Each structure stands twice: as C-alpha cells, then as structure tokens.
C-alpha cells in the first residue's frame, strides 16, 4: 500500500468519523426518555417502538464510530490493509468503502 493510498484512506476515515459522530448526536436526541402523560395508548406504543429502533441505531452508530477510530489509529501499522485471516492485501476499493475492514471480501463471507 502506498503513502498516497494511506492518505486517501485517512481522509475517508476522518470524513466517516465526523459523519458518524453527527449521527450519534442526532440519535442521542431522539432516544431521550419520552414523557407519556399526554399520550393516548397508540401514540405511547408508537413512541416505545420508535425509541427501541433508535436505541438500536444508536448502539450501531457507536460501534461503527469505535471501529473507525480504531482503524484510524492502525492506519500507519504495516499490517493495516492485510486480511487478518488469509494474509492477502485487502483491495483499496474495499478499504475506501469500509475502512474498518480487517478481512478481504472472500474471508468476510
């Protein structure tokens, strides 16, 4: 992997980190506790379901953020971009689309 490839991946990771941080903040807003005093039963149930969906989305976004931050820390490691299972290079397009990938497409399947 060239230095130019690493820089391209670094830019992508930083961009994804920033976007994911914004997602986390937005999801934190919509997962705040809901006051049920003035709601009818159907609205109350809708609120519970929506909160559950948003809680899951928040957990997923936090996990993605942690993986991206870890990938950014590992970027200068000589092993970055090498599949952790087969030892082959992970193609640049995969690293650009999923910079937190530690496995090639074949091994990830």
Image (tube, rainbow, N blue to C red):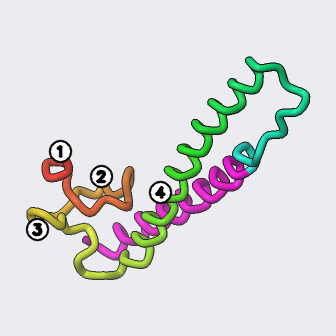
Lower sequence index among marks 1 and 4:
4
- Give how far across and how far down residue 34 sits, in percent: 79, 40
Point out the residue furthest to the left here.
86
Cα gap from disc 1 to disc 3, whole angstroms: 15 Å
Which residue is tagged 3?
A: 87
In this view, 45 is above or below 12: above
Query: Residue at coordinates 47% horizontally, 57% vertically from top-left?
Result: 64
- Give how far across and how far down residue 92 sits, in percent: 28, 58
Side of 63 where 96 appears, left or right: left
Q: Residue 52: within the magenta?
A: no
Point out the residue furthest to the right here.
38
In this view, 16 is above or below 78: above
Q: Secondary structure at mark 1?
A: loop
Which residue is tagged 4?
A: 64
Query: Residue at coordinates 75% horizontally, 26% vertically from top-left?
Result: 44
Lower sequence index among marks 1 and 3:
3
Of the two numbered discs 2 and 3 in the rendering, the one whose residue sits closer to the viewer: 3
Lower sequence index among marks 4 and 3:
4
Cα gap from disc 1 to disc 4, whole angstroms: 19 Å
- Give how far across and how far down residue 58 sits, in percent: 58, 49
The part of the image, by quadrant, that contains residue 48 is: top right
Query: Residue at coordinates 48% horizontally, 70% vertically from top-left?
Result: 69
Lower sequence index among marks 2 and 3:
3
In this view, 14 is above or below 44: below
Q: Main secondary structure of the magenta part?
A: helix
Which residue is tagged 1?
A: 109
Cα gap from disc 4 to disc 3, whole angstroms: 24 Å
Lower sequence index among marks 2 and 4:
4
Of the two numbered discs 1 and 2 in the rendering, the one whose residue sits closer to the viewer: 1
């Amino acid at each position: 992997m060239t230095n130019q490839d690493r820089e391209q991946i670094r830019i992508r990771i930083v961009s994804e980190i920033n976007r994911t941080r914004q997602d986390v903040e937005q999801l934190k807003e919509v997962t705040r506790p809901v006051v049920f005093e003035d709601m009818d039963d159907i609205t109350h149930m809708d609120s519970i379901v929506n909160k559950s969906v948003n809680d899951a989305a928040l957990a997923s976004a936090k996990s993605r953020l942690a993986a991206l931050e870890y990938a950014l820390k590992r970027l200068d490691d000589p092993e970055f971009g090498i599949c952790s299972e087969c030892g082959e290079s992970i193609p640049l397009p995969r690293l650009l689309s999923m910079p937190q990938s530690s496995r090639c497409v074949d091994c990830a399947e």
